[in-house]
Image: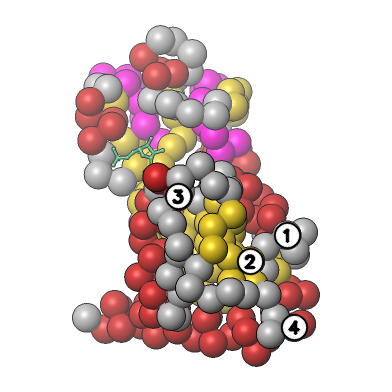
Amino acid sequence: MNSLTIALSKGRIFDETLPLLAAAGIEPAENPEQSRKLIIGTNHANIRLVIVRATDVPTYVQYGAADFGIAGKDVLTEHGGSGLYQPLDLQIARCRMMVAVRKGFDYAAASQPGCRLRVATKYPDIAAEHFADKGVHVDLIKLYGSMELAPLVGLSDAIVDLVSTGNTLKANDLEAVEHIADISSRLVVNKAALKLKYAAIQPIIDAFARVVNADKAA
Ligand code: AMP
């Protein structure tokens, strides 16, 4: 029987993936939040989970170190998606990619075509494309976390970040001023693995698809 390696990140994606795995009859042996193990077994001797940073999931799958994984559209857009088959929008970890500024900042005036804006983000490709479409020049400042701090201390005029409930923006006196894209997590499969391990992988994709379609119908 083919062995299968599934790449997942901790937190929101892992939690929301559990019901999908359960529908495919897969149960993790441990909770990665309570374990320092990076490789977690399942109730199937031939199926294991590797716990990686969300931004690294496409890379593990691209190189075949994992057969498939689950990654946010934000991460996939920045990665470029090369070598990956993306058969299914799982509709989990849903949020929005937004531009946000300090309350009171005149974004409408500052983002006229021809203006120059300093933008801090973890998503430079997405931000660059968005502002290029608007004809706004941007100085992009790459950050790896807590983008919300940047406009508060004068590092940037605006941020491009994910917004879910909006509570983080609110708590930091920021406001969303532009919607860039709706984001959700996708199944990503290594193209070669899908061919070579089709009999093992396709039933799992089908089980995930049944859950997604049932949720849509509900
Ligand atoms: P919220 O306060 O619920 O709007 O969440 C905003 C914070 O959570 C920001 O720091 C975002 O970067 C992060 N965030 C929100 N949704 C997601 C998601 N689906 N995946 C990863 N990070 C997220």
Could one spot residue 71 in this view of the protein? no
Which residue does the numbered mark 2 point to in the structure image? 5
Q: Residue at x 25, y 22 (%)?
A: 173
- State how far apart marks 4 and 1 are (Cα): 15 Å
User: Mark 1, mark 3: which one is toward the viewer?
Assistant: 3
Identify which amino acid the numbered label 1 is placed on: Ala
Which residue does the numbered mark 1 point to in the structure image? 65
Does the beta carbon of the residue at mark 2 sit less than 8 Å from ligand 1?
A: no
Which residue does the numbered mark 3 point to in the structure image? 32
Which residue does the numbered mark 4 point to in the structure image? 195
Badge 1 density bin: few <14, some 14–19, many ≥20, Cα 10 Å? some
- State how far apart marks 4 and 3 are (Cα): 30 Å
Up/down of 188 relative to 158, above or below: below
Magenta extent: 99-124
**Which type of secondary structure does the marked residue at label 2 adopt?**
strand
- Location of residue 165 (image quadrant): top left
Identify which amino acid the numbered label 2 is placed on: Thr
Does the beta carbon of the residue at mark 3 sit less than 8 Å from ligand 1?
A: no
Identify which amino acid the numbered label 4 is placed on: Lys
Identify which amino acid the numbered label 3 is placed on: Pro
- State how far apart marks 1 and 2 are (Cα): 8 Å
Q: Provide residue 216's location: percent of width, then percent of height.
A: 30, 78
